[in-house]
Image (tube, coloured by chain):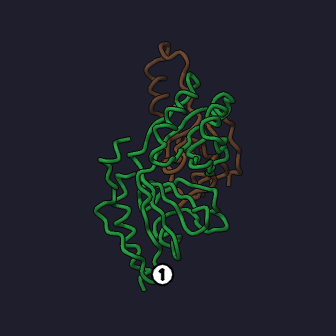
Chain colours: A brown, B green
Amino acid sequence: MLLIECPWCGERDESEFSYAGEAHIARPLETEKLSDEEWANYLFLRKNIKGLHREQWNHAAGCRRYFNVERNTVSYKISGSYKIGEQGPVGDDT
Amino acid sequence: MSDLFHQQSPIVQIKLTEPKANQPLIREIPFQGFLNLRGRPNNPDFMTAVKKVLGCSLPIEANTVVVSGDYKIYWLGPDEWLVITPTEQQRKVQSELISALGVIFSSVVDNSSGVTIINITGDNAANLIARDCPLDLHSTVFKAGQCAQTRLAKSGAMIAPLLDGSGFELIIRRSFADYLLLWMQDALIEFEA
């Protein structure tokens, strides 16, 4: 089990959270000008990073807020969490 | 809120026995008024309007409780609070809040029939909850004046230490109350001897 730090509630058990996918995916501004390929890329394609990964979590059983977490997908070590809209910490890549 | 005449406790069919040996005491505090209040804490108009009605400032610090006279205000999120009032004052507080807030970006929702309060007091109160709750309930880290929304036996619950230090207050959904009380009665067996 992971111990995840909610930016508001502090460290809580993983079972209180739900995963919400890759973070920092900006919706394209002029969607009508996108090709099908670009639109599909925005909708469906996600990175599959080995190493530091920025992802969204929702504190579902707690304050019910979304936030971002930077986690190493190899070691599962969480280097930090930060609110939506903020620039996150860059942890070491080990 | 429905009329008191028609109201029935969500755990009416469960017989709560007197605690034996080291068992904690489980009691329901039924029919309180619950208001879900939302608004922007960085809007001074919102904060002053609420303060005028409730008599105290909303708790801004995460997971804290503020008591003001008959009212208790729990932090639910950075822009969300739970106001608990005595049964007969819920309608008055709700309409006062709505008229005080006026056009300010906010919402006041009556949730009185949706949740109920269970108090667990005495020896092993923390141990009973800890049977299936990931929260650290030790009195050195979870003190009176704090509250936490968490998971209790696979259902959601708001847990707060009672102000007199005698145990914990659980605020649970009434639709889960029956299940949770049955779960508690099962968990109580451990403390029977």
Instruction: Point out residue A25 in the picture as x, y percentages from the top left corner.
Output: 56, 32
Examine the rendered structure and indicate whether residue B29 appears above or below residue B188: above
Amino acid at the residue labelled 1? Asn
Give the crowd class for mark 1: few <14, some 14-19, many >=20 residues within 10 Å.
some
Give the quarter of the image for residue B160.
bottom right
Residue, x 71% and y 45% (percent of image)? Answer: A90
SS label for mark 1: loop
Quadrant for the N terminus of chain B in the image:
top left
Quadrant for the C terminus of chain B in the image:
bottom left
Task: Name the chain under label 1.
Answer: B
Examine the rendered structure and indicate whether residue B74 appears above or below residue A85: below
Pick the front one: B111 or B190:
B111
Instruction: Point out residue B21 in the picture as x, y percentages from the top left corner.
Output: 45, 84
Total marks in image: 1
Write down the residue under mark 1.
Answer: B22
Residue, x 61% and y 61% (percent of image)? Answer: B163
Residue, x 61% and y 67% (percent of image)? Answer: B165
Residue, x 63% and y 62% (percent of image)? Answer: B142
- Whether residue B177 appears in this view of the structure is yes
| Image side of residue B98 versus residue B50, left or right | left
Task: Name, please, the residue furthest toward the top.
Answer: A33
Task: Name, please, the residue furthest toward the bottom.
Answer: B193
Instruction: Point out residue A73 in the picture as x, y percentages from the top left corner.
Output: 57, 51
Examine the rendered structure and indicate whether residue A62 appears above or below residue A23: below
Pick the front one: B101 or A83:
B101
Instruction: Point out residue B135 in the picture as x, y percentages from the top left corner.
Output: 55, 62
- Whether residue A52 appears in this view of the structure is no
